[in-house]
Amino acid sequence: LNITGLARGLVIWRSSSLPAPLIISTWSFGKRGNDAAWPILARGGSALDAIERACCAIEVDPDVDSVGFGGLPDAAGHVTLDGCIMLSPSRSGSVCAVRRFLHPVSIARQLMEKTPHMMLAGDGADAFAAELGFTPADLLSAEAQDAWRKWRRDHEPVDQSQDQVFKFPRPVDRGSDPTGRGSGRLFSKQPPEREESDWKHHDTIGALAIDSHAVMAGACSTSGTPFKLPGRVGDSPIIGHGLYVDPAHGAAVATGTGELIMGVCGSFAVVECMRRGASPIDAIREVLSRIVNEFQIADHHQVAFIALKPDGTFASAALRSGYKTSVKDGQRNEVIDPELVMMS
Ligand code: SD4
């Protein structure tokens, strides 16, 4: 045990086994979020503040084509944002189908902290944000609008029954850009390779953190799948699907094809496996196997999870190649490959 401080005359004893602060985010662009959040964790601030800051940094970044401003719109040309935040089973907030505000995670946090509710949708979420004084924002970038116009041209009339929405090659993360920050361009053409779609596409910033008080928190934010049916909501804002945090047993966050993740309550299932004693990587392996067994997996499908235990051990794994994880703590600031890629 170490004496770590004095407060109002009380000696605060802290176990030397407390984990050092840590933040882990999905994709290589998550590194930008980690960098933005790190000063909070480094000065002893809260994991909750840190993951909110990480998500906000990505939401305002127009170079990230899957979150916040710059995200691709739905089939009707409207960008809708989903996000959630979680500390524990009794402390979470989420919003979905937000159309007039840029920061779903911040709105979700306000919902968690200021109301007895856990989830708000659509106009109700927008009205709540307006009432709280969030600044309205235009979410549709010129580039995303061009992409939508091209999509409409090529898919007229829109026939969602043919699964057009999902028939784009899956996102591929090539790691850091020349600045070392992670490109954020998971879907744009990047010659010479042509593994990706002509379209920029969808994905999610998911972040898990532990602060110096050993508190764990998680959040995720997305514009969902591109050109989705208006009203479609994926896993990301739904507690237990895109994100789950149980302070005693661990946290998990997901990215990828929401429908696959939702089919197995993915993040909750990962945490449940850890609760029963599985390591983070074995927990993810079990849930990915379940997805493979339950769904007809197509080329364009991707699912990745990050799992974190309260002691700071973590793992990430993906259904397919092309996914990366960003991690930052006192010693390192890296973009790493997942420990496991389940299918070729
Ligand atoms: C969704 N899981 O809406 C989110 C978006 C995402 O890769 O992560 N797509 O399905």
Image (cartoon, rainbow, N blue to C red):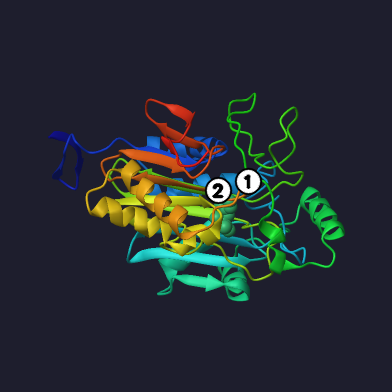
Q: Quadrant of the N terminus?
A: top left
Q: Amino acid at mark 2?
A: Gln
In the image shown, does 222 or 132 lie closer to the viewer? 222
In the image shown, does 323 or 217 lie closer to the viewer? 323
Image coordinates of residue 178 in percent, x first then y, are 65, 24
Q: Quadrant of ligand 1?
A: bottom right
Image coordinates of residue 218 in percent, x first then y, are 41, 52
Residue for badge 2 = 302
Farthest residue to the right: give it: 153
Image coordinates of residue 90 in percent, x first then y, are 32, 66
Instruction: Tell whether circle 2 marks a residue whose Cβ is less than 8 angstroms from ligand 1.
Output: yes
Q: Secondary structure at mark 1?
A: loop
Which quadrant of the figure has residue 132? Answer: bottom right
Instruction: Tell whether circle 1 marks a residue whose Cβ is less than 8 angstroms from ligand 1.
Output: no
Q: Amino acid at mark 1?
A: Arg
Confirm whether residue 236 shows in the render: no
Q: Earlier in the sequence, mark 1 or mark 2?
A: 1
Residue for badge 1 = 170
In the image shown, does 316 or 93 lie closer to the viewer? 316
Q: Secondary structure at mark 2?
A: loop
Image coordinates of residue 222 in percent, x first then y, are 58, 55
| Labels 1 & 2 near each other (Cβ < 8 A) | yes
Which quadrant of the figure has residue 244? Answer: bottom left
Query: Marks 1 and 2, how far apart in space?
Result: 6 Å
Dot 1 crowding, Cα within 10 Å, few <14, some 14–19, many 20+? many
Looking at the image, residue 62 sits to the left or right of residue 311; the answer is right
Vertical position of residue 3 compared to residue 100: above or below = above
Which quadrant of the figure has residue 329? Answer: top left
